[in-house]
């Protein structure tokens, strides 16, 4: 297994991989998930479809990897000493422009997910689970510090709260989520639900 | 204005109107919003397109009215004496089967909304605003009773919390929202965010 993984990874360089993901995201923004084809990715990146399938397995895997790759991923470095500080720092990793772009990208993928059980599975396994693992570390530290009770019922709905706020902003208010919106939402909803006092 | 409204409404009976909305919802479930045409509605209901346009103005208006009409709309009769009681009673208006159907319908409309500013406007004016007016009455009674502080920051995010929980259930957990899920979510997230103690 380990040998196979190395052999598979060694076929392309990290630079080439980043270039490919960028092309996939460009196509995703241009045509949306449903109309995006492996043929178009192959043409845009001058690679063979065989290589794409060998490397990623399929369109859902490739798109989810590309979306995940677009996140700066400095989450692991955040440790401010309070839950509020950590959640604010997470929001502040991105500027408003990046948040808006991510929101548009995620909307495109979420729309496709509704009709596509395969994409939902890949998205859960390769996007939500790794993201949740990061969040669980942040929350576990808050529990260890005594900020959040280990049996707090809102812990079961962490992702529903966070994704819900992010996703409903565009739908309900006809504007993309911004840093200011997300920070207010964390202070007004997420922290009180977790029993953490806010200033 | 009042005369015009009466003249416009008087063209079809309430029974015929209900029949039309049912046909629109059937079509919506069958083909989705984007593929639903006024031609198909006219054919299915044996009405003329001219009548449909005169009565509803356009596809977005007709679909949103049909979705809104599908809700039992007994919200106004609920007044249990506590916010928790009122929110639970709201959820319990529908059984799991109806909640699942509504969830599928709303997903279909929400998907179309992402690419359709006209539908977003009509949906906000004719669905979200009337629904919010109901919620505001429920919440205002809770504020008047002293259950919720009038300056509680979560009041600005009421709809984001509620729609977020409802909408993310299918996306994140691959199962439709149920009564049990919504009641737990209200107790774990919505009430604590509003500063209302739960048992």
Image (spheres, coloured by chain):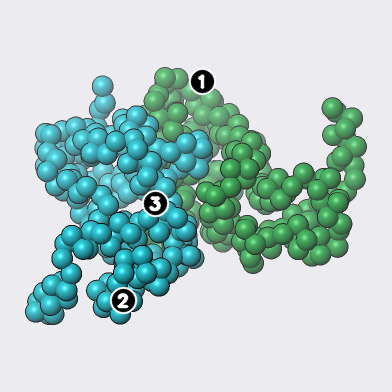
Chain colours: A cyan, B green
- Whether residue B79 is visible, yes or no, is no
Q: Return the x and y of residue B29 as percentages of the image width and height.
A: 63, 63
Give the labeled residue for mark 1: B144
CA distance for labels 1 and 3: 42 Å
Number of numbered markers: 3
Which of the 4 image quadrants contains residue B151? top left
**Closest to the observer, A154 or A77:** A77
The label nearer to you, 1 versus 3, is 3
The quadrant in which the N terminus of chain B is found is: top right
Q: Residue at x 35, y 38 (%)?
A: A97
Q: Is residue A140 left or right of residue B123?
A: left
Q: Return the x and y of residue A112 as percentages of the image width and height.
A: 46, 61
Callout 1–callout 3 Cβ contact below 8 Å: no
Residue A48 numbered mark, or none: 2
Q: Residue at x 63, y 57 (%)?
A: B33
Q: Residue at x 25, y 35 (%)?
A: A92
Residue A105 numbered mark, or none: 3
Output the chain of dot 3.
A
Element under disc 3: helix
Q: Earlier in the sequence, mark 3 or mark 2?
A: 2
CA distance for labels 2 and 1: 67 Å
Above-or-below relation of A165 to B174: above
Query: Mark 2 Cα within 10 Å, few/some/many (few <14, many 20+)?
Result: some
Element under disc 1: helix
Query: Mark 3 Cα within 10 Å, few/some/many (few <14, many 20+)?
Result: some
Element under disc 2: loop
**Closest to the observer, B103 or A88:** A88
The label nearer to you, 2 versus 1, is 2
The label nearer to you, 3 versus 2, is 2
């Amino acid at each position: 297994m380990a040998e196979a993984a190395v052999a598979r990874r060694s076929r392309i360089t990290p630079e080439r991989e980043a270039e490919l993901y960028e092309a996939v995201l460009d196509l995703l923004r241009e045509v949306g998930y449903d109309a995006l084809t492996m043929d178009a990715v192959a043409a845009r990146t001058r690679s063979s479809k065989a290589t794409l399938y060998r490397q990623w397995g399929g369109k859902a895997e490739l798109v989810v990897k590309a979306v995940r790759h677009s996140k700066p991923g400095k989450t692991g470095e955040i440790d401010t000493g309070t839950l509020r500080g950590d959640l604010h720092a997470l929001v502040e990793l991105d500027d408003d422009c990046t948040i808006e772009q991510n929101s548009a990208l995620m909307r495109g993928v979420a729309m496709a997910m509704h009709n596509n059980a395969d994409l939902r599975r890949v998205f859960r396994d390769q996007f939500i689970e790794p993201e949740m693992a990061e969040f669980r570390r942040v929350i576990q530290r808050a529990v260890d510090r005594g900020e959040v009770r280990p049996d707090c019922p809102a812990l079961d709905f962490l992702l529903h709260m966070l994704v819900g706020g992010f996703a409903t902003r565009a739908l309900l208010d006809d504007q993309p989520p911004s840093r200011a919106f997300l920070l207010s939402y964390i202070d007004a909803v997420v922290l009180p639900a977790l029993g953490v006092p806010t200033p």
